[in-house]
């Protein structure tokens, strides 16, 4: 059974998700969260069934760290939990990026419902000073789990720096 409780997310990421969900609502996108935190037992189960490429032990999902959510669309409005109209997904993704959240489809070319804490250290610095110390750990975990390394983190930081500055100005 998937856990949908936002309170089970890591604090900093939870805050990003709250900003993201509010913005989606403001822009008229009817989406909802289908999964937040995932236990190791559930991750193993999904891996066995072929629902994930991460075994939950050697390679962990960001869901296990409380740093990922899965979303779906409102069926009465869109006719499907996972509509075929890509423009809807792109709208969601562009809002997510503004809040330092990466989209599964950008990261590995599939898994559109998946959103996870950005590899970019920028949002961590901006949202909370005390998270500065987590930056090196953040990049390290990305390297070990996904093997993307610092290049990806840097690319994303540069790509979203402007949006983040704009966001900061609105929040503070
Ligand atoms: Zn996911």
Image (cartoon, rainbow, N blue to C red):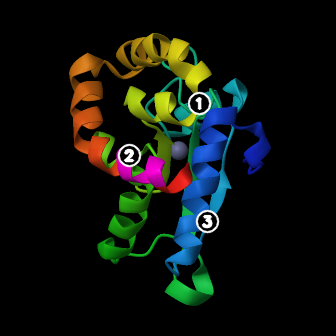
The magenta-colored residue range is: 165-169
Q: Which residue does the image show at 60% across and 50% down from the upper left? A: 17
Category of crowding for the residue at label 3, using alpha-carbon neighbours closer than 10 angstroms: few (below 14), some (14–19), many (at least 20): few
Please state the horizontal and vertical placement of residue 24, each as a whole percent of the image: 53, 69
The residue beneath circle 3 is 22
Category of crowding for the residue at label 1, using alpha-carbon neighbours closer than 10 angstroms: few (below 14), some (14–19), many (at least 20): few
Q: Which residue does the image show at 76% across and 38% down from the upper left? A: 8
First in sequence: mark 3 vs mark 2: 3
| In the image, the residue with mark 1 has its CB under 8 Å from the nearest atom of ligand 1 | no
- Judge left or right: residue 161 versus residue 59: left
Instruction: Calculate the distance from the C-alpha at mark 1 to the C-alpha at mark 3.
Output: 19 Å
Q: Nearer the viewer, residue 61 or 158?
A: 158
Instruction: Assess whether residue 166 is covered by the magenta stretch.
Output: yes
Q: Nearer the viewer, mark 1 or mark 3?
A: 1
Majority secondary structure of magenta residues: helix
Above or below, 152 against 93 in this view is above
The residue beneath circle 2 is 164
Instruction: Calculate the distance from the C-alpha at mark 3 to the C-alpha at mark 2.
Output: 17 Å
Residue 20 is drawn in which quadrant? bottom right
Instruction: Assess whether residue 52 is covered by the magenta stretch.
Output: no
First in sequence: mark 1 vs mark 3: 3
Q: Secondary structure at mark 3?
A: helix
| In the image, the residue with mark 3 has its CB under 8 Å from the nearest atom of ligand 1 | no
The residue beneath circle 1 is 128
Please state the horizontal and vertical placement of residue 18, each as a whole percent of the image: 64, 54
First in sequence: mark 1 vs mark 2: 1
Above or below, 153 against 70 in this view is above
Please state the horizontal and vertical placement of residue 45, each as a whole percent of the image: 64, 33
- Judge left or right: residue 66 versus residue 108: right
């Amino acid at each position: 059974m998937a856990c949908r409780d936002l309170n089970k997310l890591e604090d900093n990421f939870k805050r990003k998700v709250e900003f993201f969900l509010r913005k989606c609502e403001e822009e008229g996108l009817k989406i909802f969260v289908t999964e937040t935190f995932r236990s190791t037992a559930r991750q193993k189960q999904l891996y066995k069934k072929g629902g994930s490429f991460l075994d939950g032990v050697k390679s962990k999902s960001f869901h296990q760290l409380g740093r990922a959510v899965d979303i779906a669309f409102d069926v009465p409005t869109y006719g499907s939990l996972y509509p075929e109209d890509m423009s809807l997904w792109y709208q969601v993704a562009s809002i997510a990026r503004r809040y330092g959240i990466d989209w599964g489809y950008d990261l590995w070319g599939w898994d559109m419902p998946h959103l996870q804490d950005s590899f970019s250290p920028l949002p961590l610095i901006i949202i909370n000073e005390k998270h500065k110390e987590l930056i090196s750990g953040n990049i390290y975990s990305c390297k070990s789990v996904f093997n993307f390394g610092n290049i990806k983190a840097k690319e994303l930081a540069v790509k979203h720096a402007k949006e983040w500055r704009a966001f900061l100005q609105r929040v503070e």
